Image (cartoon, helix red, strand yellow):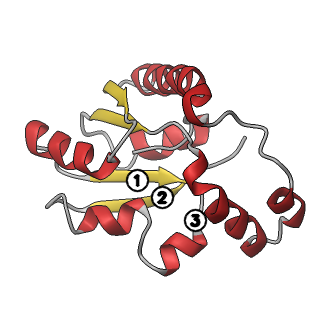
Amino acid sequence: MIEKPLVPTDTELVTTLHGDEEQSFVVLMQPRGDQDQLLRALDDVALGEFGDAVREPDEPEGEEAVPPAARGLDHSLDALRAAGAEAVGQLVSEHPLDVLASVVAETGADEVVVLTAPHYVEELFHRDWASRARHRVGVPVLRLFAHTE
């Protein structure tokens, strides 16, 4: 589960987690929505990025976020495939944890990797994707912080 396209460091990280084992990925990506604007502003304040907390975001939101998210998903899938992994994916518009649980059940996944930026407020109250997924999917959930390059 990702919230932004993978950068090379992220791709290397997830494709080397299990050494030389053959890997396949089902990537779920949710376009950004305006529902999490307050939480993002609080995260910016927690990280000391006060200018970002009061500035309007530059990234598209809502319906405008779908085309860039689709391009980001395609980029991420291409990067995983170039690293030698099998990869398929989909954009998730609503109820990402429901979709995640169904993908785990349908594919017999061994593990879930949640790769997002730090979300301190959500993590504090265990409302982040990884914390919530641990109670839903029945397999180990690994929480990793996405890189910015």
What is the C-alpha distance between the residues marked 3 and 2?
A: 11 Å
Q: Nearer the viewer, mark 1 or mark 3?
A: 3
Q: Residue at x 52, y 53 (%)?
A: 116
In percent of width and height, residue 139 lies at: 17, 59
| Identity, as a three-letter code, of the amino acid under mark 3 | His
Q: Which type of secondary structure does the marked residue at label 3 adopt?
A: loop
In percent of width and height, residue 36 lies at: 58, 56
In percent of width and height, residue 68 lies at: 60, 24
CB within 8 Å, label 1 to label 2: yes
Q: Nearer the viewer, residue 35 or 112?
A: 35
Q: Which residue is mark 1?
A: 114
| Identity, as a three-letter code, of the amino acid under mark 2 | Leu
Tell me the crowding category of disc 1: few under 14, some 14 to 19, or many 20 or more residues within 10 angstroms, Cα based. Answer: many
The image shows residue 51, relative to residue 20, as above or below, that is below
Q: Which residue is mark 3?
A: 119
Q: Nearer the viewer, mark 3 or mark 2?
A: 3
- Numbered label attached to residue 146: none
Q: Residue at x 73, y 75 (%)?
A: 46
- Numbered label attached to residue 144: 2
Q: Nearer the viewer, residue 35 or 9?
A: 35
What is the C-alpha distance between the residues marked 1 and 3?
A: 12 Å
The image shows residue 33, relative to residue 140, as above or below, that is above
CB within 8 Å, label 1 to label 3: no
Q: Residue at x 63, y 49 (%)?
A: 147
Q: Which type of secondary structure does the marked residue at label 2 adopt?
A: strand
| Identity, as a three-letter code, of the amino acid under mark 1 | Val
Q: Residue at x 30, y 34 (%)?
A: 25
